[in-house]
């Protein structure tokens, strides 16, 4: 009997967790020939998320949990869950029910026989999502697939079921600045894509603002492509050539045709434009340098405050102390 580890990152999901737990228990009843472990990763939630998870753990021995010392982000939560998992197969899904647990049996059927190393999901519709967010999301997938070697499918979700071998390959990539969608594509392995229609959150509100999604997309571009650096170099070369041509034009116009250059407003605009390009290119280089700086610090990807094992060890210690006091 194989074991399937289900990793669920959670950040302020107290409203959605009861719905999710009920749904995954129903799926487990359907997949009764498999062993399960549910690894809830509390990513520094400020609501009652951890208390709800602890209640699950008391009632269900399949439940395990990891609680961070603060909010480290979804990428860190997924990595922590992968490190803690010990199943033959590993699945990652969100807690908000936008990743339907009902797809797990179908996903598992493709992987269990070794035909595929992983089954990944992708949204074919974006109903219920703001149009501007959908537009920029589509543009991001187009850009990153053109400028990087990472194979990232439009609408790809983090909802994925993979073999132990692929999970271990992902764990071998210990980079601090993580972009899992790119990592999945970079490590390779044979992947089956499973399309489904967009599903709205069962409860609560999304934690991903437009700005967070924008910075996350930059993480992906910087982490899996050096093309922006090449673009900055090309822009610098183009403007050097243009400035040289413009200098020759001014010399010819002034000396041969005796026509001095007029108009400081046009000159000011040119200076401001070129300065803007320079700052833009410097910003690109700065982004790569900042990521390199963070990597060289070698800080841990996450810090654990509490797990179910630590909690149980404390309970056992208290119980042993009480027994010693009696005797």
Image (cartoon, rainbow, N blue to C red):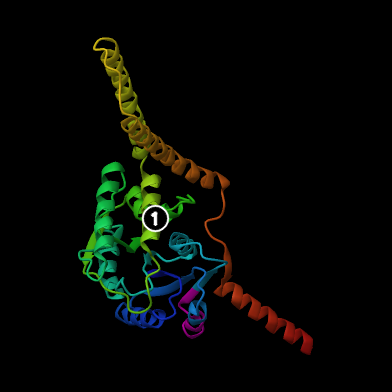
Q: Position of residue 288 (x, y in %)?
A: 45, 42
Give whichever of 159, 164 is nearer the camera: 159
Q: Position of residue 241 (x, y in %)?
A: 31, 23
Q: Is residue 83 above or below residue 263?
A: below
Quadrant of the rendered structure where residue 161 is? bottom left
Write the residue at 27% across / 56% down.
Answer: 136
Query: Quadrant location of the C terminus?
Result: bottom right
What residue is shown with label 1? 216
Disc 1 is placed on an element classified as: helix
Residue that sits furthest to the bottom in the current view: 326
Give whichever of 93, 237 is nearer the camera: 237
- Residue 276 magenta-drawn? no
Write the residue at 31% across / 32% down.
Answer: 266
Q: Position of residue 168 (x, y in %)?
A: 43, 55
Q: Position of residue 293 (x, y in %)?
A: 53, 44
Q: Residues within 10 Å of mark 1 (few under 14, many from 20)?
A: some
Image position of 297 (left or right of 79) = right
Q: Which residues are magenta?
A: 54-64
Quadrant of the rendered structure where residue 318 is? bottom right
Quadrant of the rendered structure where residue 323 is? bottom right
Query: Quadrant location of the N terminus?
Result: bottom left
Q: Is residue 227 above or below residue 67?
A: above
- Residue 62 magenta-drawn? yes
Residue that sits furthest to the top in the current view: 256
Q: Is residue 160 above or below residue 1?
A: above
Write the residue at 31% across / 72% down.
Answer: 98
- What count of labels does the image hold? 1
Image position of 67 (left or right of 120) = right
């Amino acid at each position: 009997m194989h074991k399937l580890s289900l990793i669920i990152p959670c950040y302020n999901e107290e409203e959605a967790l009861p719905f999710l737990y009920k749904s995954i228990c129903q799926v487990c009843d359907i997949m009764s020939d498999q062993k399960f472990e549910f690894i809830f990763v509390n990513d520094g939630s400020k609501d009652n998320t951890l208390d709800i998870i602890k209640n699950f753990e008391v009632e269900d021995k399949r439940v395990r949990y990891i609680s961070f010392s603060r909010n480290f982000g979804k990428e860190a939560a997924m990595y922590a869950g992968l490190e803690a998992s010990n199943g033959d197969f590993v699945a990652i899904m969100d807690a908000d029910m936008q990743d339907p647990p009902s797809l797990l049996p179908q996903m598992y059927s493709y992987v269990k026989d070794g035909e595929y190393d992983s089954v990944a999901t992708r949204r074919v519709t974006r109903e219920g999502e703001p149009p501007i967010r959908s537009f920029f999301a589509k543009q991001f997938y187009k850009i990153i697939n053109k400028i990087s070697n990472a194979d990232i499918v439009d609408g790809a979700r983090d909802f994925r079921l993979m073999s132990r071998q692929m999970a271990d390959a992902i764990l071998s990539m210990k980079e601090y600045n993580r972009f899992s969608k790119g990592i999945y594509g970079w490590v390779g392995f044979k992947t089956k894509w499973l399309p489904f229609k967009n599903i709205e959150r069962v409860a609560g509100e999304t934690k991903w603002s437009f700005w967070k999604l924008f910075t996350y997309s930059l993480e992906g571009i910087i982490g899996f492509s050096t093309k922006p650096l090449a673009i900055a170099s090309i822009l610098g070369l183009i403007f050097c050539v243009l400035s040289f041509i413009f200098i020759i034009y001014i010399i010819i116009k002034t000396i041969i045709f005796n026509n001095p250059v007029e108009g400081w407003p046009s000159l000011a605009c040119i200076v401001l434009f070129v300065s803007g390009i320079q700052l833009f290119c410097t910003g690109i280089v700065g982004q790569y340098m900042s990521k390199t700086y963070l990597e060289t610090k070698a800080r841990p990807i996450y810090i654990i405050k509490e797990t179910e094992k630590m909690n149980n060890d404390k309970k056992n210690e208290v119980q042993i102390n009480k027994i010693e006091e009696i005797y």
